[in-house]
Image: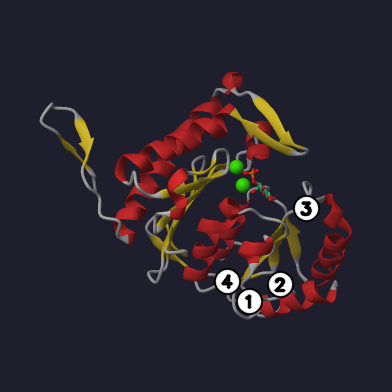
Amino acid sequence: MEATSKDTRGSFAAKKTPATPKGLLNIAVRAARAAGEIINRNFEDRDHITVQEKAKDDLVTNVDRECENAIKGVISRYYPEHGILAEESGSSKNTADSDYLWVIDPLDGTTNFCKGIPHIAVSIGVKIKGITSVGVVYDPIRNELFTATKGEGAILNNRKIRVSNIKGLDTGIFATAFPCRNREHLEHYQKILARVFSRCADIRRAGTASLDLAYVAAGRMDGYFELCLKPWDFCAGELLVREAGGVVTDFEGKPDYAKNGNIVAANPYAIQNLLREIKAAG
Ligand code: IPD
Ligand code: CA
Ligand code: CA
């Protein structure tokens, strides 16, 4: 497991870790746990948290940045030539030259974190030649590690997970998010919400997109829809859903969510019913 070895000076140095999906997953987990430790430490002892507003209703803290640096530090130690797209620092210089792109949300659920709501995650996805191949979503407070490798299924703490098997919406519990940073879409969103809510059992807005997707993968939620997501919000989570037997589309039922940021996720039956309501809202 350990990807380090002692060098001739007696210090620990990175051993060349192959960029296989297994090697990438190992390093992604290591990076996510490093960030998780930082989150847990600061969540308990809140005196050192400083908050800034990046944009209206869009917060960032020193802990988001510390986590991002820790994650990038682990990645560049093992894979210095890989590209990185991270929420707080943007794209690394070599993203165009590398076949590998690490897509990082160092602290997903910053508003929850700032309010002391224990529902937060670290999200790390790895794309190989543009195809998401590894995904890690780590909830450090519950110590729940969701992982997926393309073609190998999705796992929560060593146990395989599957999406739920509901077909209609009536018994379903769905995750969503209000478009608080994109209020120009509120009217459209309200129509969608009204249609879905009138046909399902209930709806949750928990505040951490990567966990919304991970919970769909684990069958805890029967589906999820949100507007205007960013790549780091969904990169790892969408692989979890697909590897757990689910489907991810945009609001038109197309695979264009990477372009428009509008995401719907559910099992292959429920997503048809969910999309019918979303499309009917106009
Ligand atoms: C946000 C959270 C939230 C979702 C937003 C995201 P952040 O991410 O995942 O649940 O509704 O769309 O931007 O800013 O906390 O990393
Ligand atoms: Ca996020
Ligand atoms: Ca974030």
For the residue pair 21 and 269, the one nearer the viewer reads as 21
State how far apart marks 3 and 2 are (Cα): 22 Å
Q: Which residue is mark 2?
A: 171
Q: Amino acid at mark 3?
A: Phe
Dot 1 corresponds to which residue?
166
Label 2: few (<14), some (14–19) or many (≥20) C-alpha neighbours in 10 Å: few
- The amino acid type, in three-letter code, at marker 4 is Ser
Please report contact status of discs 1 and 4: CB closer than 8 Å, yes or no: yes
> Is residue 175 shown left or right of residue 15?
right
- Identify the coloring: secondary structure
Disc 1 + disc 2, Cβ < 8 Å: yes
Mark toward the start of the polypeptide (3 vs 2)? 2
Secondary structure category for the residue under label 3: loop
The C terminus, quarter of image: bottom right
Near-viewer residue (233 or 277)? 233
Name the residue: 82% across, 63% down.
193
Residue at the right extreme, as displayed: 187
Is residue 62 shown above or below 100?
A: above
